[in-house]
Image (spheres, helix red, strand yellow):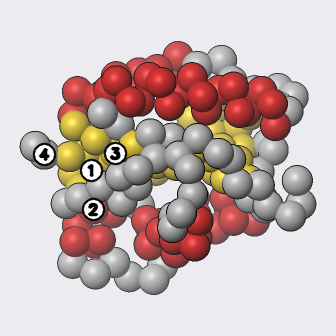
Amino acid sequence: MPLCAIAYVSDVAGPLSAAHLDALVEDAIRFNSLAGVTGVLLCDGSRFLQYFEGPDDGVSAVHERVLQARSHRAIHKLGHARVPQRFFPYWSMRWLGVEPALIEVLSAGDWEAFADRIAGGSPAGSGMERLLQFVAPHLPGQAASQPVRSAAE
């Protein structure tokens, strides 16, 4: 089954507590599980960066849901492409608390044709490669629905 992925950055729409973010992610986990979509959400308290992957119809359904969500605004799509594999196969959705500088660095990375670069050996400056480098230490032995918060939270 062909897979595709979308990455975007957006601004948090209002005050966002860890409990509210946990509830949003739990809701996303339920929806994404049904849609066959996996991914990761980074949040620095004022911005989100999300990457999600799966079958075309599932990714389209999640993307439409993202566009309708009231929890954020100023949505900017970083990339939308076919991917050769799932990079987050065990996370229907997982959120990681991050420092603002990380979202800045990731969103400034090159996301054009990110899937092709991953398949052929992504350059260190690409947004996808930077995302994978950041998330990799969190992958082993972590439960899909448990948030990982940075020391700053």
Query: Of marks 4 and 3, which one's residue comes earlier in the chain?
Result: 4
Q: Nearer the viewer, mark 1 or mark 4?
A: 4
Label 2 neighbour load within 10 Å: few <14, some 14-19, many 20+: many
Q: Are marks 1 and 2 in contact (CB under 8 Å)?
A: yes
Q: Which residue shows up at 74% across the image and 58% down it?
A: 98
Residue 84 in the image: x percent, y percent? 19, 60
Query: Of marks 1 and 2, which one's residue comes earlier in the chain?
Result: 1
- Counting labels gives 4
The type of residue carrying mark 4 is Pro
Query: Of marks 1 and 4, which one's residue comes earlier in the chain?
Result: 4
Q: Mark 1 to mark 4: distance in Å? A: 11 Å
Label 4 belongs to which residue? 2
**Looking at the image, is 39 positioned above or below residue 56?**
below
The type of residue carrying mark 1 is Ala
Residue 116: quarter of image: bottom left
Residue 113 in the image: x percent, y percent? 28, 61
Query: Of marks 3 and 1, which one's residue comes earlier in the chain?
Result: 3
Query: Of marks 2 and 4, which one's residue comes earlier in the chain?
Result: 4
Q: Mark 1 to mark 2: distance in Å? A: 6 Å
Q: Nearer the viewer, mark 3 or mark 1?
A: 3
Q: Which residue shows up at 75% across the image and 65% down it?
A: 101
Q: Mark 4 to mark 3: distance in Å? A: 10 Å
Label 3 belongs to which residue? 53
Left/right of residue 117 with respect to residue 11 in the rendered view? left
Label 3 neighbour load within 10 Å: few <14, some 14-19, many 20+: many
